[in-house]
Image (cartoon, grey):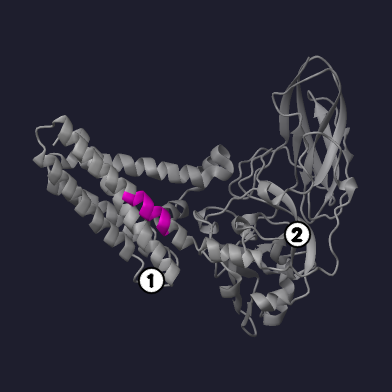
Amino acid sequence: MKRSWSAFVSIVAGAFTLGVATFLAGVMTRTGLSTGTPSPVVAVGGTFVDHTPPWLKNFAVSSFGTSDKLALFVGMALVLTLLCAAIGVLGARRHTAGLVAFALVGAIGALAVATRPRSGSLDILPTMIGTAAGLWALTTLWQQGSRDADGSTLDRRRLLVRGAGLAAAAAAAAGFGQSLGQRAAQAAQSRSAIKLPKAAKPVVSPASAQLDVKGITPYIIDNTDFYRIDTALVVPQLDTAGWSLKVHGMVEREVTIDWATLLAKPMEEALVTLMCVSNEVGGNLTGNAVWTGWPVRELLKMAGPKLGADMVLSTSSDGFTAGTPLSVLTDDRSALIAIAMNGQPLPPEHGFPVRLVVPGLYGYVSATKWVTDLKVTTFADDEGYWTPRGWSARGPVKTESRIDVPRSGDRVSAGTVAVAGIAWAQHRGIKAVEVRVDGGPWQAARLAEEPTVDSWRQWVLPWQATKGSHTITVRATDDEGVVQTQTEAPPAPDGATGWHTITVNVA
C-alpha cells in the first residue's frame, strides 16, 4: 500500500477514534456516569494548559487574545493530523508497528483523562473504546488497501469513499456527543427562567463618567464584548437546580447554600473593573461592568473563619482554583458572589450561574467562574491554580493607564486632537492622569467622574497637534499618591508595568 494512501486512512482512523470517544463521553456526561473529563480532546487540551509555562501562556494570550482556546484546538488538530499521518507512513510497510503506535497515542489520551480533576474509574472508557474503534477502522482500511494493490482509479475511489464515510460518521458522532456533554439546552433553559431579584441600592452609572470622545472605551462594557480568559477549554454548562456552594475548612461550621437560598439573600450591585494578569501594557484584557450579587463576607460570616486563616481557596466546577486573601473578602469592599452582569443573568462564558467578583485583585487570584466551593485555609497550606506555575500568590492590581485614541500608527490632522483613554487602580481610585508629547513636560488630563474607586476612570487631553511624527505617553497617579511606574515588566509573575506609549503621524 502506498504511503500517501496509508497516511490518509490513518488520519481517517484517528478522526473515527475521536468521534466515537467524544460521543461516548457526551453520553456519560449526560447520564451522570462521569465525574471528571471523559473527552480525550478536552482532557489532553486541559493537561497541556495545566503544564504551560508562564512565558508560553503570555505568548498565547498576547498573540491570540480571547481566541487562545480556538488556537489551541486548531493546533491540537494539526498535531494530531500530522501524528496520524506519520503513523500511516510507518504502517504502510510495517502494519504491526503502526498499530502499536496508534494504540500508544490512545493510551496517552486515556492517561490525560485519568489524571484530570475529579476523574472517576469509568472516565477512561470512551477513550479506550474509541481507540479500539480506531484500530478496527485502521486495520479494515489497510486490508482494503492491500487487496486493491494494483492502485487502479476504481480501487482508489472505493478506498476514498469508505474513508470519507468513516470520517463523516466520526464528525456526526463528535458533534452529537459534544452537544450531549455540554448540557447546553438545560443550562439555557435554566438561565432564561431566572427572575433576578432587585438590589436594595441599584447602581446608576452617571452620564458624567462617560466622556464624549469618539473611539474611547465605553465606561461600561457590553456583556458580548467583555474579555474572556480562563482555563476552561469547553464552557461549563450548569443549571441552577444542581448548583450549590460549600464553605468548609478552617471554619466554626460548614455551610452549603443552593440557588434558591442564594437568590433569597439581599442583593447588592457594584461597578467593578476586572482584569487579567496577562494584560500587557496598553492591552485590552480588562472590562468594567455592573455586577449583582451577595457579599462574600456575609457567607463567610455564617461559617465563622477560625483564627489563623488568611486565605480562601475557591474552586470552579471544572477544577480551577484561586487563592484569595481572606482579608479582602471580609472587609467593606464589594466582593460579591455574583449572579448577574449588567442587569442580565451571568452569560455561560462569564460564570453562569455564579462567580466571584473581587475588586482590586487580578482575576487569576479572585474571579473564579462557575464557583462551587470555598475552602477557608492559609497561604502556607494551599495554593491556587496559577501559583505553583510561577505566578504571585496574591496579585493586587497595579496602577496603570492606557491610550485608546488615537491608536498607535494613526494619521491625524493638524489642530486640536483628543488624546483619551482609561486609567485604573481598583479599590484605590485614580487621582490624576498626565500626558506628555515627544518627551516634553507632563500635562494634566481632564478626568471623567469616578462613581467608585473599584472601576476604571476615563480621561482626555486636548492636544494641539503639529505636522510630523509624534510620540505620546500616559501615566496615572492613584488616590494614595502612588505614581504609575515607568519600569517595564512583563505580565509574569504579578502583572505588567510601564508607561503606555504610542506614535502618531500628523498631516
How crowded pointer 2 is (Cα within 10 Å; few <14, some 14-19, many 20+) is rated as: some
Residue 319, image x and y in percent? Answer: 51, 64
Q: Residue at x 28, y 48 (%)?
A: 166
Residue at 39% in and 68% down? 28
Q: Nearer the viewer, residue 60 or 479?
A: 60
First to last magenta residue range: 169-177
Amino acid type shown at disc 1: Gly
The answer for how far apart the CA atoms under marks 1 and 2 are is 38 Å
Which residue is under mark 1? 120
Q: Horizontal placement of 471 versus 449: left or right?
A: left
Observer-nearest residue: 3 or 383? 3
The prevailing secondary structure element of the residues shown in magenta is helix
Q: Secondary structure at mark 1?
A: loop
**Residue on which the image places disc 2:** 343
Residue 357 is drawn in which quadrant? bottom right
- Looking at the image, the residue that sits furthest to the bottom is 253
